[in-house]
Structure formats: structure tokens, C-alpha cells
Image (spheres, rainbow, N blue to C red):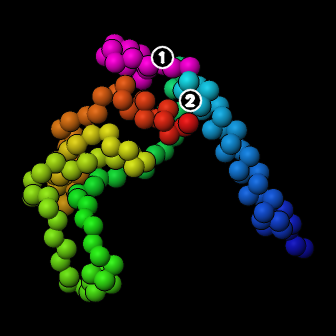
Amino acid sequence: MEEENTDMENPQEGTEVAQEKDAAQQKLFKEDLSALPMSDDEDQSDSLLNSKTLEFLFDLELLMSVELARKEMRLQDIVNLDEGSIVEFDKLAGESVDILVNNKKIAEGEVVVIDDRFGVRIVDLVNPTDRIKDLTQLAS
């Protein structure tokens, strides 16, 4: 007895349904974010973060990354990299690293070691209102 898997029979149809669902979710997200008042006032930023409009977003999982440094290199130099090659960056040891969420900078921090694992101590946060504004720009 063979089970039918309708998702695998027509992968293009499944992709179209997923795209329609994503578009509908993005439309709702834009509508909710456009309803948020934007102000540089700190009291206002606290109310934005506690807003019922954002409440449904709090369960979303986002990619957080820490950027040590960036460097532009010629393709030839990249192709010539071998095991043991060292790439030198302009950033000084001990200098703050950027903390990114979905490739948007939200903070700066310093690298720490906790039980043989790396971590980061936040030393400077981007203003919460600016973080919310970045969300609205991503949605538009």
C-alpha cells in the first residue's frame, strides 16, 4: 500500500502556495507596522516594544550573528587561500564587534569566553526606536 504525498507530486504548486502565504503574512506585517507611531521620544520607544501590535511577532526566531571584521580581497587572493593561510583584518584585538539580527546591526559588544564557548557582552545598543524603524524599512 503506497501513501500519496500530494506535496511532492507537484512541487511548483507547493511553492506557489508558500509564496502566496508569505505575501499574505508580509501584507499583514506591513499593515501592523504602519499603524505604529514613530517618534524619537524614549517613552514612545518603550510603548512600541510593549505594543499589542508587536505581540504576535515575539515568538519569531531570527538569526543573530556577530561580525568580527570585514575585508575586501581580490578573487585571486581568495582562490590562493590554503589550509593554514592567515587573513589579517584591520580591526584591533579587543575592539568591539557588531551584533546583527537578520543582517541589521542592533548592538556592539565585546567577545567573552564562558566555559570554553564564545559569547558576547553587549556594551552599546542601537536605540529601540531606530530598531523598530529598521523593521518598517525591511517590510516596505
The answer to which of 1 and 12 lies nearer the viewer is: 12
Label 2: element kind: loop
Numbered circle sitting on residue 63: none
x, y (%) of residue 124? 20, 36
Q: Amino acid at mark 1?
A: Pro
What kind of residue is marked 2? Answer: Phe
For the N terminus, give its image quadrant: bottom right
- Name the residue located 51 percent from the left edge and 20 percent from the top edge: 36
Looking at the picture, how far across and down is residue 131, in whole percent?
38, 32
- Horizontally, residue 7 falls left or right of residue 72, namely right
Image quarter for residue 24?
top right
Q: Earlier in the sequence, mark 2 or mark 1?
A: 1
Quadrant in the picture for the C terminus: top right
Q: Which segment is the magenta one?
A: 35-51
Residue at screen point 81% across, 59% down: 13
From the image, tell me which residue sits under label 2: 56
